[in-house]
Amino acid sequence: MRRNTMQNIEKKMRDAVKGLFNEKKVDMVIGFQNGSLPKTARPYFVRSIGDVENLVWNDRCTVNLATFLPKLFERPARPKEGYKPPRIGVIVKGCDGRSVAGLIKENQAPKDGLIIIGMPCSGMKSFAKSRKGSSEVNRACSECISPAYQAADIIISGESRKPAKAQYARIKAFEAESPEARWKAFVEEISKCIRCNACRQACPNCYCKVCFADQRKPSWVSPSAELSDIIVFHMGRIFHQAGRCVECDACVNACPMGIDLRLFTQKLALDAKDLFGCVPGISGDEVPALQTFKQDDSECFITDPEEK
Amino acid sequence: MNMIQNNPYIPAPVFVDGITFENEAKDLKTFRLAFKNKADEAAFDYKCGQFAMLCVPGAGESPVGIASSPLDKGYIEFTVKRYPTGVVTTALHDLSEGDGMGVRGPLGNSFPLEGLKGKNLVIIGGGFAFTTLRSTIRYLLSDGVRGDYGTITILYGARSAGELLYKSELEAWQKRSDLTTYITVDKGDDSWKGRVGLVPMVLKDVAPSSADAHCLVCGPPIMLKFTIPPLLELGFAPEAILTSLERKMSCGIGKCGRCNVGGQYVCKDGPVFTYSQIRHIPENGF
Amino acid sequence: MFQVALDKVNIKKLIAALLKEGVVKAPVETDGVVELAEISEKSSVAFDYSNVKLPVKREFFPQSEVISRFGPDGVAPEKNGAKKTVLFAVRPCDVQSIAYIGKVFIDDQYQDPYFQDRRDKTFIVSLACSSPASTCFCESLGQGPARKSGSDIISFKLTNSFVFEAVTPQGEAFVKKNKKLFRGPLPKELSAIKKQEEDAIKKLSAVEVNMGALKQDNDPALWNAVAETCLSCGACTFLCPTCHCFDLFDEKHRDGGKRVRVHDACMFESFAKEASGHNPRSQKGDRMRQRIMHKFSYAPDNFRLIFCVGCGRCIMNCPSNIDIRETLAKVTA
């Protein structure tokens, strides 16, 4: 995308946000500002019209801003008199918008407390990629089927990248490998984990007040980096995403160890689509796959795991 | 410090020698523990105000103030509240007499009783934070010790009569002539014939003299918040007010970084602090 | 100042000599990432790198470590089986951090035998920095690209040779034992290492650390603003060379089990949360304040050491790009 077009989009975005503050429609807007490292952008909370000039839009806006919403809308334990839930504007790419839709569906953010500002997205580059001067976008972006969120309250016009065609090509190739090869690849990749929880904290869907991994009565998994504990943590977290994960790669981008979590999250997304017809956040009215069942739901994962 | 093989992480083996229910709600029990090895018992040389890690292997450890007096021989006592969400306190409460467990300690600093000889002492406790104060009172009232100190005033309050700890000892103290004991409850009931009133209110009523006196005060943060101002008004200097803080702990030896209040670790620099040491720390909790 | 030199072509001989002292761990590059790994004579050591991904503290204070085992016979301490190890070509900032957390683990009252054992068995040959990252700010904290303390030997890599300086008696003993490997350093080599240090310092990020202006009072509005985009993950903590917080966790297995020490982070919401439900640091701002105060106020008070060596890993790895340099500026204004 040419620079002046990007600047154009940025200006339209800032004007829209200023409008929201002028019309007193929001208490804050979550967007991006320039990061402290060259060629990065980072989350930014705009609380007054004076801060709007700091908002940026570029191909470094990787973070999924939906992750901040559940905590911001959480009702305080002892609300002060006259407490009202905040009204929050949020800048979204296609993936982020689908996350917001999921949070609304799961009652973590109220639809009438949100103003979703949908941006045109031509793909994002991670910090590592932009440091190498690469022109490639992140894998999540090259495989993205929903670059712009169509159900946004405010749509900033501009050209987005074309939706990907063979979104699951890599996963299907991996599925075709032997169980031994797949297990070896899984263990090699996941062994790098240091249990820092960055993946979980960056994921908009991981909003549980007490994560299963932190529960102590009973204790499901130890906080250690023993392989068995790492596997249980990631298996648990990723399976909890089935039918909810929008493949935004927030977890991949947050992981300091560069673990290819996408290899596993995408598999769950593919299964939810194939087995239950569930693609979260696209149709907008689907019930989350894990919260319902149909009589003709596939049970092959019990009876014959190797068959599709 | 009782260190097995020079390793501060290994507990000494003990067994449960007796269990007393302390309150009506039955979620406060006093455990009398006896050491399996005489050497461990000899090494567990503690002072009033210190705590130990009670260790239930498989559940974990919990820091608990030592409730027995250092002069009590052959056993150590701890009064533990069971929290429904607490893994270790629940496991402790599930133990029976004769069961084995572990103790790591003694840990922390103590009430500086040596340096307070000759002084008058005002001892104020609220709720189940009274445990190390009970250790202190038992010690002070011992033969050969009582004479070293001036007047002793005790003020102890609980939410209700059923929640008062160490009831038989409270009765005995009230009968003694060498100390003044005030027991109060926040809320009275038909069984209670004594004083009713929150500890800070009763403190203002009885107004113990601060002349040549130090105050040991332990209780939940909310009680400390309302008890310290009247103490200051009565003329107790901030250096003469001693309290015991509590925080979540893991190692108990100042290494895991968890229990600090400002730059002070409750397990190592405390749990006993003077009010002057902690009054300006924003995280002091009151 | 016991200095010797070695031509670059002979570096394998030095590695062979180090391998005689124990297991050797050195930086190795895989797919663009440099990590500390066990090496053999055939390995290719990465010398031209800014820093290894994970902090070297993990060699002395691993993410998970069995402390003891319990069973019907009671509780027994675990022998961690540490082997004699050489850390080769690690950075001075990481080497400093080991001494710093050593002050926590070993004190007059309590000595952590697990840390002590690993420390006693480790010989450190550091590599002075010539190419710091843009996020390195060690010098602003009193560290430096050629800081010697904590190493047994410090090495300097020049275009065609290495210069080594023995710092401790153990370092000297190694050099003397292997004196056939080395030659005396040339004057131009000695001036080159000085210039390398000066050039490296110029490349560092300069941060004004005005700790005297660090407010002791809490300012919740300020700290909540600093931490508002924090995700409360533990990336900064787990990648920090001087962070040492841990938890002890019992794992049951049949009729016994083990007690494990694991890394923990004050940034986690439940870090200080008590069984009663009370959380003294329930707000993100309080936790951010704890992190900064611990490093820049409490540790200096307790140990006369700033618990930050300016390695920049937290800056590089924070998913929200919260930059400690900016935080320091905001809270010491």
Image (cartoon, helix red, strand yellow):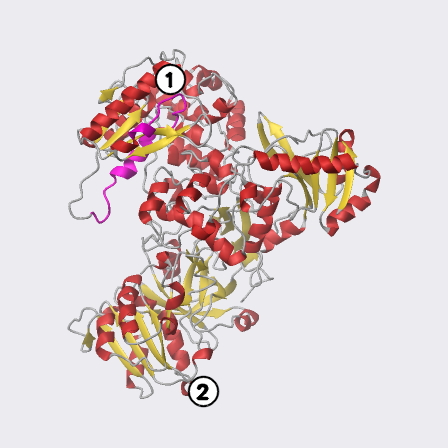
Image quadrant of residue C136? top right
Estimate the x, y position of residue C198 in percent, counting from the top left.
64, 37
Above or below residue C250? Residue C48 is above
Disc 2: which residue = B144
Chain part drawn in magenta: A52-79
Disc 1 and disc 2: Cα gap in Å? 82 Å
Estimate the x, y position of residue B138 in percent, counting from the top left.
39, 79
C81, C40: nearer the viewer: C40
B32 vs C109, left or right, is left
Image quadrant of residue B262? bottom left
Labels 1 and 2 positioned on one and the same chain: no
Count the numbered circles shown: 2
**Image marks 1 and 2: residues in contact by CB distance under 8 Å:** no
- Chain identifier of the residue bearing label 1 in the image: A
C289, B104: nearer the viewer: C289
Residue occupying the point 29% across, 73% down: B231
Q: Any mark on residue A144, and which?
A: 1
Above or below residue C31? Residue C325 is below
